[in-house]
Image (cartoon, rainbow, N blue to C red):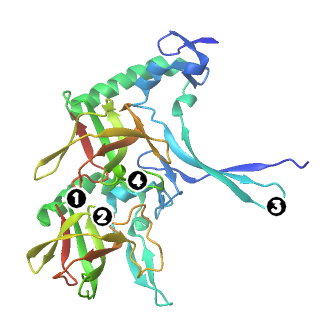
Amino acid sequence: MQEKCSGCGTEIEENECVACEGGYICQECAKKLRILFPKVLTWQKEIDRAGRGDVDVEERAIWLDPLAEASSDEIPEMIKRADEERNARRQHYGADNRAVFIVDDNHKRMKYPGESDKVLGEYVIMGRVVLGDISGNGEIAVSRRNKVYTKTIKRVELTTGVILTKTDSIDEGNYGAIVVQEDTPFIYPGDTLIIR
Amino acid sequence: MSEVKTKIEYLDKGTCEVCGRKALVVRKLGAKDLKDGSVICGDCARKIRFMYPVMYKMNKQNKLEAKDPIKELNLDEAKEAIGNAMQKLEDMRESNGFHNAVFRVDEVNIKKGGLFSKPIATITGYVIYGRFDKAEYCKIIHDGVEQETRIAELGDDYRFSTPVTTIYPGEAGYPCLITIVQKGLNIKPGDLIVKD
């Protein structure tokens, strides 16, 4: 079934768009809005109460989409606000930089059962892209008081909330991981990484 | 056939009042209840953990019990601490000779090696800032003299009755146990292990 995007008015397929309150948003407009409306991770536990007491059935990660609660009438205005926010961040971080990433965690990759030894020795920097998109090539830079440290990006991965999966890029507003081959002990939780 | 009833529970403590993400309580993701009843997520807590290391005190059963100073903060104090964290981190780095990670040695046990085996040192202490991982090269600073070494194993400190709530042992602000297998190791309580 064809619907109209509440943001740009283009015709979209219902199964290829993001639902909002009273309408739909195309993927392009949703991507523009992620800077203001990042998805939110939570976990659910399903408890089976089939007459044998409470039995934990399953724990799973769920991504909540705040765009689902946005009113379709407000979408064009929100896109304008998102553009303003993007420009403000470009000014703040420097317009020449490809992207900006805020670090939540930085650790050496552990090997899970069944994984190849190749993953050992990789370093995983988890966090959120606050400006631009990050692809699997480029360089990360972090400014410390004594010097600016740089490392080459090996690849990027998206988080499902449980595991990380390889991807071509992490889009603006999304959570994911930057994987580098060498140790990055100079990167700490809360750091701002500039992607060049 | 009886109807299977399931109940869904969210494994979070609501929204983090600093960053707006869900304060997850699953898989050691560690949401923190603050003194005034507010909640911050584990990612925000991790950013200030080096300023508020987990403390331990002896309980009546003669075992060490954890005390988390972040839980003694109110929301305004937590926000201020997060806002100042990078500045504090830079100050700490500068006062520690710009080492990327620093571990303070509290206890050392060295098991003598034999004819064909090297001595094994089990070292307990605190990660002051930064992080350590196993199979990484670092330096011991003993009486002002630096000695190259390599961490053979890294794990939770066995002395504590309460498990440390980190996903990866070796994080800033937590005690941990480092094992080094090396001949001629000069190390004593009060020394530092550093990573550059």
Q: Which residue does the numbered mark 2 point to in the structure image?
A: B50
Q: Secondary structure at mark 4?
A: helix
- Residue type at mark 3: give it: Arg
Q: Chain of mark 2?
A: B
Mark 1 vs mark 2: tell me if same chain: yes
| Mark 1 and mark 2 residues within 8 Å of each other at the beta carbon | yes
Q: In the image, which disc is placed on residue B89?
A: 1
Other residues around mark 1 within 10 Å, as few (<14) / some (14–19) / many (≥20):
many
Q: Which residue does the numbered mark 4 point to in the structure image?
A: B43
- Residue type at mark 4: give it: Asp
Q: Along the polypeptide, which appears first: circle 1 or circle 4?
A: 4
Q: In the image, which disc is placed on residue A52?
A: 3
Q: Nearer the viewer, mark 1 or mark 3?
A: 3
Q: Position of residue B30 (x, y in %)?
A: 47, 60
| Mark 1 and mark 3 residues within 8 Å of each other at the beta carbon | no
Q: Chain of mark 1?
A: B
